[in-house]
Amino acid sequence: MRLESPRNPRVKNWSELKDRKGRDRQGLFLVEGRREVERALAAGLEPSAWLVWPERAGEEEKKLLAGAPVYELSEAAMRKVSYRENPPTLIGVFKRTAHRLADLPARPRRVLVAVEIEKPGNLGAMLRSADASGADAVLLVGDAVDPENPNVIRASTGAVFFLPLAVAGHEEALDWLRRSGLDLLAATPAAGEVYWRADMSGPLAIAVGAEDRGLPELWLATAAQRVRIPMEGAADSLNVSVSAALLLYEALRQQSG
């Protein structure tokens, strides 16, 4: 089979999937690497195409190549398509997901609300913690990073495919939280209450905001509880993924009795 070169129009189209505009226009996204591909398939996602670096592909990668056309790419073509500095042997092209509120669980116990999170690595790490701590759903609110950004997928180690996930505007998200019977807990350094003293034993939505701006006033004003994470050193903020993990696991501890 002739290898696809970087000049091939198909390769150009696949490379555009690294950007949100390209993903939105084509209705597709990339899943890079065997581990992430395996998790996408385990979650029931259906591939549209397989992109393979044949010189490096082993039997484990070849076993995954079913259900879609297979294209063998030259090293230069793989580097053009891949988001990573060191391209993987296998990239799956998958159809975009709707991420609707209507598809979330009707009566969740623990929900993470990520408000205007812009850094893919942070969101991916948050999704990984949400999955590990048993969160029932994640809401991405406002001008947030695309959950199908390749770096979100990588940083989440594929957990993004298993979590019920929705993208919504501010008012729409708050309305869904009210209808779902969830108390809203907002994380903010200005709060007087330390997070482990808050009551997280009931159905709960944990809201965190971007590190540089924090949560918008709308979320702080709506919250039933505001909490802070104490910081004893010189740093004036924590990575938002660390904050989310601490709050998620405290909620798990309390709700586990």
Image (cartoon, rainbow, N blue to C red):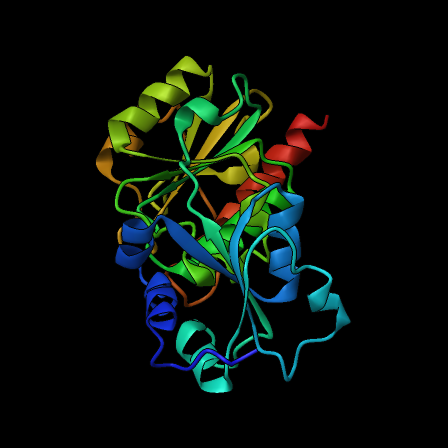
Query: Which of the 4 image quadrants contains residue 107?
Result: top right
Q: Quadrant of the C terminus?
A: top right
Is residue 245 shown to the viewer in this render? no
Residue in the picture at 65% in, 34% down: 252
Total numbered badges shown on the rendered structure: 0
Asked whether residue 41 appears in the rendered view, the answer is yes
| Rendered position, 176 above or below 1 | above
Residue at x 45% of width, y 63% of height: 151
In this image, 66 relative to 239: left or right?
right
Say which of 109 and 101 sits in front: 101
**In this orientation, which residue lies closer to the viewer: 230 or 252?**
252
| The N terminus: image quadrant | bottom right
| Quadrant in the rendering for residue 57 | bottom right
Up/down of 25 relative to 174, above or below: below
What residue is at 52 percent from the left and 17 percent from the top? Answer: 106
Q: Quadrant of residue 203?
A: top right
Q: Residue furthest left?
A: 217
Q: x, y (%) of residue 217?
A: 23, 36
Q: What residue is at 58 percent from the left and 51 percent from the top?
A: 128
Nearest the viewer among 232 and 115 is 115
**Percent of width and height locating residue 118:** 32, 55
Q: List the single residue furthest toward the right.
A: 59
Residue 41 position within the rendered picture, expressed as x and y whole percent measured from the top left = 63, 49
Q: Give the image location of residue 93, x and y in percent.
A: 48, 57
